[in-house]
Image (cartoon, grey):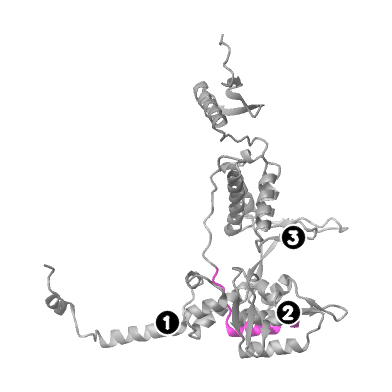
Amino acid sequence: MRGKRERGTGRIFLRGNTWWIQYYYRGRQVRASTGESDEKKAAKVLKKRLAEVETGTHVDSRNFRYEQLRDAYLLDYETNKRKSLRRDKDGNLRLDSVTRLDGFFSGFKASEIDTDRLRRFVADQQRAGLSNGSINRSLSALRRMFNIARRESRIQTLPYFPMLKESAPRQGFIEKKEYESLHRGLPEYLRLPLSLGYFTGMRLSEVLHLRWEQVDFLANTILLYAGTTKNDAARMIPISTQLRALLLAQHSRRQESCPFVCFRLDRCGRADKLGGFRKAWYSACIKAGLGRLEPVVDSATGETLHANPRKDRRNPKRKMKMVYRGLIFHDLRRSAVRNLVRSQVPERVAMQISGHLTRSVFDRYAITSTNDLAEAARKLSAFHENGDKTGTNCTEMQHTISPVQ
């Protein structure tokens, strides 16, 4: 029979084949499973917990749940005014990467989210047809949630996050003939946004929020204010001759009630700020041969996935889930940067126009000037035809270079 325990030493006890520990933290009794079937190992776990209580480093995260992780993460985004944060129709904060996590981890305790459960999340998202990049964004968001909780002493340890290998950076470009074909196929109200993206390299959000006060027809420039761009830096963009004509035509149709450059007319003929146009873009790109719709296939079974039918229909039919593959608006930005390099604009100037802060963008976009390639081919051909014209060879160099004393 065991003797009476000393106060503050806790105790271990057996439940089935697993040893549990009991101790007090801030006046409250804590009971937790050690996951050990060996009594000595369980005693070590208890000793570690008691040391944490003594030093003030202990954290009781038994009832700390995923929803608390998510709320702290969204609050961090809101207080730091992250531009990727959106709100839904009800005004609630929304991030696509977090929405995917909600559908899988809602109701889980933070202690229950381990590496094995993360791998199940990855498999679930792959079966839904998501790309490795999209899955990694969700895993990165969850890892950030855990880091915030650990920084605030809500948890002590983080699980291992099994990140996936992503495909190579997107290489989509649009040539002039393709741009002209797409320009003809788009509705009239979308032609100016297309031209702004193609000729200036502005991001979609910058195009949609552009106001007439930022367009200077005398100086032939567009000014993006500080704080409105992705990196919050102001920048000046030149207006090409082709774009100037389109802007002037749009300026003649403007209405005083709408200060935005890109607008569309409602049923009453009033100009209204242009919003998202994803469906119209996909339709025009498919007609122009620059995109296509593909069925979403379960990577595990190879079966085509179907969307749930709408409940408000009398005889709802299941429709295949389709995903768009092809030209996206951001490809216009990539094409604009490449055209700047092709026209022999210095890279530093091109980076100032596009708003890129580092030289790595040219490597990531795989942008190479055709003039540079043609010049390299000319020099290489001349070398093979005429040989080495430097006037030296290896034998001569051996005689002329003196040995190191």
Q: Amino acid at mark 2?
A: Cys
Q: Residue at x 88, y 58 (%)?
A: 314
Of label 2 and label 1, which has the lower sequence position? 2
On screen, residue 189 versus residue 36, left or right, reads right
Disc 1 is placed on an element classified as: helix
Q: Nearer the viewer, mark 1 or mark 3?
A: 3
Quadrant including the C terminus: bottom left
Contact between labelled residues 1 and 2, with CB atoms less than 8 Å apart: no
Density class for disc 2 (Cα within 10 Å; few <14, some 14-19, many ≥20) is many
Q: Position of residue 145 (x, y in %)?
A: 62, 49
Q: Which residues are magenta?
A: 170-189
Q: CA distance from mark 2 to mark 1?
A: 38 Å
Q: Which residue is mark 3?
A: 87
N-term mark: 1 or 3: 3
Decide if residue 122 is in sight here. no
As drawn, 323 above or below 152: below
Residue 312 lies in quadrant: bottom right
Residue of label 1: 373
Q: Which residue is mark 2?
A: 262
SS for dot 2:
loop
State the image quarter where residue 8 is shown.
Answer: top right
Q: Is residue 176 magenta?
A: yes
